[in-house]
Image (spheres, rainbow, N blue to C red):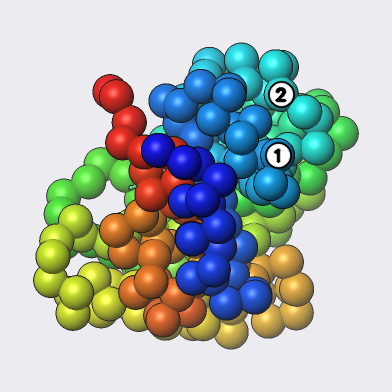
């Protein structure tokens, strides 16, 4: 397993505007240091406690992205430093992030997680739920968050057409919401989609942020 070679391989697949979130969850600090040594600065984690330990141990110019499901009672721990929260799936969570960001004197970029897969999942807004949430305009009073775009996960299937369709659906939803709610907001620009097994399809469908873990760091031990 050569993390630096794997990382270069993935970076070679990315057109210039697409950024890489190297998903380091369940891998030790040494693995992150290895990718850091060849220039990677954006890392993704999905557990608050694990992220806290890594944040404290590792260089402060790392841009930490929270990619997992975030419980409202844990927002306060990461609010002082988190660079982006990818999977916001309720207005309540958005409100809590805003509150903790205000306490930390920050504005935290957030992505709205949209449920695009056929698989059942407890998480993510349906497209209608998200439209309704945005239509209330209540989010406009939250001054310490910035809605920076959308995030989604495709069905875990070998049917590439289906995966491609789901990613394209998320891209269309992004364009629709951009037009309806964020036309004059330059912050709303990210489409976070694509993991180790499907990031090439996600890029074809317009991804701006891919979240790749095992293809760089190896299989995780759960
Ligand atoms: C774990 C995880 C990833 C990375 O998955 P890989 O298959 O290891 O690339 C991406 N996004 C989310 C939300 C994850 O939880």
Question: Callout 1 environment at 10 Å: few (<14), some (14 to 19), or many (20+)?
Answer: few
The mark found on residue 58 in the picture is: 2
Residue drawn at the location 75% of the way across and 79% of the way down: 184
Question: Callout 2 environment at 10 Å: few (<14), some (14 to 19), or many (20+)?
Answer: some
Q: Is mark 2 within 8 Å of ligand 1?
A: no
Q: Is residue 92 left or right of residue 204?
A: right
Say which of 207 and 213 sits in front.
Answer: 213
Q: What element carries label 1?
A: helix
Q: In this view, does 196 lie above or below 82?
A: below
Regarding residue 95, the answer to whether it shows in the image is: no
Q: In this view, does 174 lie above or below 151?
A: below
Residue drawn at the location 61% of the way across and 63% of the way down: 19
Say which of 119 and 208 sits in front.
Answer: 208
Q: Where is residue 137 in the image (x, y as percent from the top left)?
A: 61, 62
Cα distance in 3D space between marks 1 and 2: 12 Å
Q: Where is residue 171 in the image (x, y as percent from the top left)?
A: 43, 78
Image quarter hosting the C terminus: top left
Q: Where is residue 15 in the image (x, y as percent from the top left)?
A: 57, 77
The mark found on residue 37 in the picture is: 1
> Quarter-wise, where is residue 58 in the image?
top right
Say which of 165 and 211 sits in front.
Answer: 211
């Amino acid at each position: 397993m050569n993390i630096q070679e794997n990382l270069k391989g993935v970076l070679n697949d990315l057109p210039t505007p697409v950024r890489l979130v190297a998903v380091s969850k369940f891998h030790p600090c040494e693995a992150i240091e290895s990718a850091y040594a060849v220039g990677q600065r954006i890392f993704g984690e999905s557990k608050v406690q694990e992220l806290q330990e890594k944040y404290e141990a590792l260089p402060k110019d790392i841009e930490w992205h929270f990619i997992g499901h975030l419980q409202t009672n844990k927002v306060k721990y990461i609010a002082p430093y988190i660079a982006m929260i990818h999977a916001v799936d309720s207005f309540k969570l958005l409100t809590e992030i805003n509150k903790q960001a205000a306490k930390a004197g920050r504005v935290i970029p957030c992505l709205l997680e949209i449920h695009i897969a056929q698989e059942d999942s407890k998480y993510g807004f349906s497209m209608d739920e998200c439209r309704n949430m945005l239509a209330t305009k209540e989010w406009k009073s939250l001054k310490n968050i910035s809605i920076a775009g959308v995030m989604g996960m495709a069905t875990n299937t070998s049917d590439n057409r289906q995966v491609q369709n789901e990613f394209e659906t998320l891209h269309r939803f992004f364009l629709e919401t951009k037009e309806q709610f964020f036309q004059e907001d330059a912050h709303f620009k990210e489409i976070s989609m694509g993991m180790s097994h499907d990031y090439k399809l996600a890029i074809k469908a317009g991804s701006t942020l891919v979240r790749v873990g095992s293809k760089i760091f190896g299989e995780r031990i759960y």
